[in-house]
Amino acid sequence: MSNSKIWLSSPHTGGTEQKYVNEAFDTNWVAPLGPNVNGFETDISIFLSTQEEIHTAALTSGTAALHLALKMLNVCAEDVVMVQSFTFCGTTNPVSYLGAEIVFIDSEWDTWNMCPNALQEALEKYKHKSVKAIMPVHLYGMPAKMNQIQNIADQYGVPVIEDAAEALGSHYKAQNCGTFGQMAALSFNGNKIITTSGGGALVSKNKAYIEQARFLATQARDNAPHYQHSQIGYNYRMSNIVAGIGRGQMEVLDERVAQRRTNNQRYREFFTGVDGITFQTEPDADFFSNYWLTAILIDPAKTGGISREDVRFALDAENVESRPLWKPMHKQPVYEGTKFFGSGVCEILFEQGLCLPSGSNLTEAEFDRIFSALSEIFKK
Ligand SMILES: *Cc1c(COP(=O)(O)O)cnc(C)c1O
């Protein structure tokens, strides 16, 4: 049996990506604009527009999308942004680029995302400060409790920017993740549910935001025959080559969601009857996760002493990649001393949590290897 590396989440092309990329070459649209960029933006907008019309700007990364979203809300050094602590640095870095103060918000047990109660407490404490944005994240594809978060945000009049980088194809109360906040960021990095090799998008119901984002993302070039600038811009536009990959990937997005959800189901069946294993789980029928990654908690007090690290090492010994959950950002050295509201739920999630191989292209033989390594350790 082959012992080649089994990845956590590897790119899975659908077959038509190269057609769009070749078209770009054949027509010499080898540029940061062109028909693939327009087509990809339209595909995303159509996919997301279930209730209201959504507009899309394709960009170089999800991080760039969040940076522009914060710029659009005029976030600057005197301001405060409330961010889910349990996340990837792509959420927080753009806030720091702008020099704003971050206040970290804990997770809750149901979705593992932003805790509405901790958010409320933080907003109450900071009601005399200039709080410019709230950033919840739909981690591993699981929708955050957007109704409650939005209600609290409205109470304090603070806009929400959704980090939907991991949640394309997820929805909550039949509304797509990425369509709740004033703006949302998507990512098409190589490990996401669909990929452009690297890229992202800013999406919004508000067309003016998207037009302004396109302007800022192309060096803020004013309308003039020469190069004229009255603002500082960025070079954040997606290339027409990369967007060609995205167009092909959009054709298989629904299939990828179904495949990831099937993976999740397989792990649930495997762990049935094993004590001490908890899955990140849709709390009720309102929640629909794309289950981008299947994530579990391993409680050594209930597994007979088997810890997260024991499982990770056992898989690694079989050349199977798994990964601890995100380390809370308020525990990162770079954010030492930053304010945090909550009881530390995300710290326990980090301590006990593991992401299992979740690629939509995992083969039967690879699942056999994963389950045989897990059976070994859980004596199944
Ligand atoms: C991937 C990711 C990002 C950043 O996206 P990039 O395209 O890699 O810049 C931001 N937030 C979360 C939660 C992510 O998983």
Image (tube, rainbow, N blue to C red):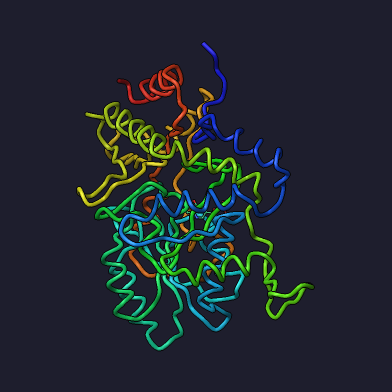
> What residue is at 60 percent from the left and 49 percent from the top?
35
User: Where is residue 312 drawn, in percent x and y?
Assistant: 46, 34
Quarter of the image where one finds residue 76: bottom right
Q: In the orientation shown, which residue stands out farthest toward the top?
A: 1
In the displayed structure, would residue 212 be above or below residue 14?
A: below
Q: Residue at x 63, y 45 (%)?
A: 242
In this view, which residue lies farthest toward the bottom? 128
- The image shows a total of numbered marks equal to 0
Task: Out of 319 and 310, give the one closest to the viewer.
Answer: 319
Q: In this view, does 360 lie to the left or right of 50?
A: right
Nearest to the observer: residue 374 or residue 144: 144
Q: Quadrant of residue 340?
A: bottom left
- Left or right of 28? Residue 174 is left
Q: Residue at x 35, y 40 (%)?
A: 296
Along the line of sight, the residue nearer the viewer: 28 or 187: 28
Q: Residue 91's x, y, as percent?
A: 51, 60
* Left or right side of 312 for 119: left
Q: Quadrant of the C terminus?
A: top left
Please give the name of the residue rendered at 52% of the width and 25% of the height, measured from the top-left corner: 317
At which x and y percent is residue 373? Answer: 42, 22
Is residue 187 found left or right of 149 in the rendered image? right
The one nearer the camera, 108 or 34, is 34
**Is residue 5 depicted above or below 41 in this figure?**
above
In the rendered image, residue 357, in percent from the top left (x then y), is placed at 45, 32
